[in-house]
Structure formats: C-alpha cells, structure tokens
Amino acid sequence: MAAKYVFVTGGVVSGLGKGITAASLGRLLKSRGLTVSVKKLDPYLNVDPGTMNPIQHGEVFVTEDGAETDLDLGHYERFIDVSLNQNSSVTSGKVYWNVLQKERQGDYDGGTVQVIPHITDEIKEFVYRVGRKTGADVVITEIGGTIGDIESQPFLEAVCQISLEVGRENSLFIHVTLVPFLRGSDEHKSKPTQHSVKELRGMGINPNIIVLRCDEPLEESIFKKISLFCNVKPDCVIENITLPNLYEAPLMLERSRFSEVVCRELGIDAPPPDLREWADMVERSRSAEKNVRIGLVGKYVALNDAYLSVAEALRHAGFFHRAHVEIQWIDSERLTPACLDETLGGLDGILIPGGFGGRGIEGMLLAAQYAREKRLPYFGICLGMQIAVIEYARHAAGFPDANSGEFDAQCPHKVIDFMPGQSSEIDKGGTLRLGAYPCVIRPGTTMARCYGGTEISERHRHRYEFNNAYREALSEKGLVISGCSPDGRLVETVELADRPFYVGVQFHPEFKSRPNRPHPLFQGFIDAAAAHAAGK
C-alpha cells in the first residue's frame, strides 16, 4: 500500500489540542494494525526550540537521535509508542536555513529563489522523507499555528501540493476548530468554525473531517449545520470534548468512529481497533486507591508545560501504582529557609527537573538538603542530579563553597563543570550532549533495582557534568556513583544507599515514559513516595 498522508490543521484560536488529536489518531490507527509515523511543521523562525524560553514555549522534547523539538512530539511518542527522530519536526527557520544554504552553494543555478517553488519544495521534501524512511502506512503531519497566520501559509501551500501529487485518495485533511459556548444565550456557536473553514478553503484546502473542540456536549443541530455549511459528510464532523484525563481522548474520539471514518476516506481496509490495553490503563487512572504529594521544584513553574514530560511521567507511574499523584508546583526562586517547613512539610517526595542558568539554584539546593535530611524520597533529573551533588558536597562532604562552573566560574570547588571539549564560547543551540547514550549501572543499587538490569540507554540534554576530580572524595563521604558511561569517564547517576529512593540522573528518563509503560525510575520514585505517605 502506498503511504497515506493525513494533515491536521487548526482554526479560530491556538491551543485547541491539534497535537492530542493527531496523537490520538495515531494510537487508533496503530491499534488497527497500521504502521504510523508523525511529523510536526512549526511556523516559527527559530531553527529549533532548543534556545527558546520554556515559559514562553514549553519544554524542549528530545528524540533518541538528539533532535530538540516541540513538546507535541512528546504527545506523539506517548500516545503512539513510537520513537521519533530528526525528520519528525521542522520549523520555518530550518526550512529557510536549508534553502539559503543551497542558494549559497549554487544549487539553484543562479535562479531567483522564491517561496514557491523553493520553500514549498523544501517543506514537501521533509514530509516525503518521513514516509520514505519509516515505510509507514500512514504519515500524520500537524501544521502548527492557526489558519490565517501569515507564517503558516508556505506550509499550507506545500501540503496542498502534496495532496495533488499523491492523489486525493492518498491524502486527508483534518481541521480542528473551536465551537464556543455563550452563557448569555445558552448555546454553542458554529459561525467561528464556518469562518475558519472558509479561510482554509481560501488556501486551496477543503477539509475532509472537522473535529470540534468544545467544553460541553454539542447539540445535534450544530453537527448538521457544520456539515451543511462546511460541505463535509455528516459523520465527518467529530466532537472532541475537553476531558479531565487527556489519555481518554482516543477512546472518546473512537466512540464517534474517528479512525473508522479516516480509514474509509483513505480507502484503507483495516481490522477494528484493539484498545483493550489502552482502556485498561485509563481505568487504572480512574481507580486510584491512594494519594501522593510530589513537590516539583523548578524555575519555570509559571508554565506547567515547561515540565510537561516530567509531569506526565509522574502520572504514568501513578496509574501503575493506582495512586493519584498530586503535583505541587514550587517556584525555587521563592524557596527560602524561613518557608521550608511550610512549603515542603506535607510532601511525600521531591523532584528537581532539568534547567539551565543560575536563577533559582539556591532554592533547589535547599529542597535537596531538606529531602536528604528529612529522608524524603528525592529524584533529581539532569540539573536535579547536579543540585544533589552540589548539596552533598557542601553539607556532607566538607566543601562548603562547592558549586557548578555554570553558576560560578570562579568557584574553587567546581564539583560540576563543562563536559570534555565544551566551553562557554560554543553556540548555545544544538551543541549540548543530545540524544540517547548508554549507561552501565552498578549492581545492588537503587538504579539496578528499578531497571532490573545493569545496561541501559537514556536521552540526554546538557553541557555540564560531574567533575571527576571529586569522584573519590564524594564517594568516601557516602555518595554512591551508581551509573557511568561504558568507558567509565562520565558519571551518569548518583544516589544514597541508606534510603528507599534518593537518586540523581544526568539524563532525562521522562522522555521515554509511556502511560501504559511507565518509566522504571518514576515507578520506583512513586512507590517510595506512596510508602512515605502510608507511614505518615
């Protein structure tokens, strides 16, 4: 079967959940036995989100091969259970960068470089490449932004051309749009959707399926009106109600025969979806038998999406243990000795996630010290591991002025410092240690217990490392180096042996957690937190 191409656009407002819609469709098609790959086209001019402020854009999701991508790729991986790659995300910046490089190299034979065909051809090549490299039955492409945005126009023109090139029978357009509810008149309004579809048609695209985002169930008249005025089949108007648990979305959409309609419109003969495992996971999420409170101490908590994968991984582990994980979002900049007990006293565990820069670091150090001294379960990820090392060096190993070279370049005891070959002169974008690297775990440690083995591979995103000059001194004082690179040069994990869970990892395990397969470290952390909660 030739690859089928599905394009997901959004209208009226941003933040409608195009990514969840695309991810849910991927899960549904995969459950029908089809192979699925997903791609995100983002209209912003950054080459990638690697240097963007997390409070503005949310987390940077990292793939196995080291691509720094939009957080929607995390949704794709979690829902569809696939490992995406460099080809799975492209921005306007990357497209223009490639085209301008080709122009400088003379690839266009001195011709005038234009948006059409040069920019659109480059976009098309990115989309086709996914189909070629993965051999997927269905390639789902989400176009970021909102219809009408000037930045999105080249992407829309490109996917319109793809549809013509592969044939209407091999392409499908899904438009996600808002149906607002006006309290004053107690009715839903279809006009914004009609206007959005009109705008999309002005770009040469007729949507085949319209997904209606709403907070409350829609009246039958709304479906009929949108079907009539937007010229789509009645069963191609799909309701997408806001849910308390986003993992219920595939089940809800399938109740409207979403994947059946998609398969019919694309001429795909596939068996009914097998959603038993997914439904069981959702049921476990609904039947929590206990409650655990986890303090997530970070500098970007003003936008929870800055730590999206961490939060989801905590919830995944909660599903596994039938525990409701209540996340307390704690701004590390506001954490002081005077408010420690008030802020952290009722917690069952403390997690410090990744981040860059010196802002809020002292608050994180206070949180790590509190967890160590109060014997609270502690989980440090990337920066969180470095915080654990600095705190231990200061208060348990006799280096009161210990710090990271990132926060104090003149510090006499830099227990964390640049990786070999790195320096402050290197560009910030795309120069970190990125992607999957192997790690060898020391037997008999918390790490070994959680993973059930001694050889793992995890994704990284950092520039600073544990300084090997302090390995012996900190080990002698009780800090356990429980994981290293296969050659022994790089410290990957540290822990304390005298408690159920006090672990720091240089990598980002949250990126590999799945709702139906929680990451083993998050499982171990929540298990320890639940035991702490039970023992209060």
Image (cartoon, rainbow, N blue to C red):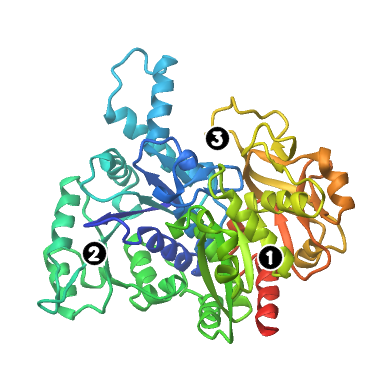
Left or right relative to 48: residue 416: right
The foreground one among 83 and 59 is 59
Residue beneath the point at 19% across and 46% down: 204
Residue 292 — which label? none
User: Which sits earlier in the primary sequence, circle 3 or circle 1?
Assistant: 1
Quadrant of the snapshot with the C terminus = bottom right
The foreground one among 135 and 60 is 60
| Amino acid type of the residue that numbered disc 1 sits on in the rendered structure | Ala
318 w.r.t. 192: above or below: below
Tell which tag, 2 or 3, sits nearer the viewer: 3
Q: Which residue is mark 3?
A: 430
Q: For numbered disc 2, what is the local secondary structure?
A: strand
Q: Which residue is mark 1?
A: 371
Residue 168 in percent (x, y) is at: 29, 52
Q: Is residue 181 visible?
A: yes
Residue beneath the point at 18% across and 80% down: 220
Labels 3 & 1 near each other (Cβ < 8 A):
no
Residue 148 in percent (x, y) is at: 20, 47
User: Which sits earlier in the primary sequence, circle 2 or circle 3?
Assistant: 2
Q: Quadrant of residue 125?
A: top left
Q: CA distance from mark 1 to mark 2?
A: 44 Å
The foreground one among 461 and 75 is 461
Residue 249 in percent (x, y) is at: 41, 72
Q: Is residue 37 visible?
A: no
Q: For numbered disc 3, what is the local secondary structure?
A: loop
| Amino acid type of the residue that numbered disc 3 sits on in the rendered structure | Gly
Q: Which residue is mark 2?
A: 178
Q: Residues within 10 Å of mark 3 (few under 14, many from 20)?
A: some
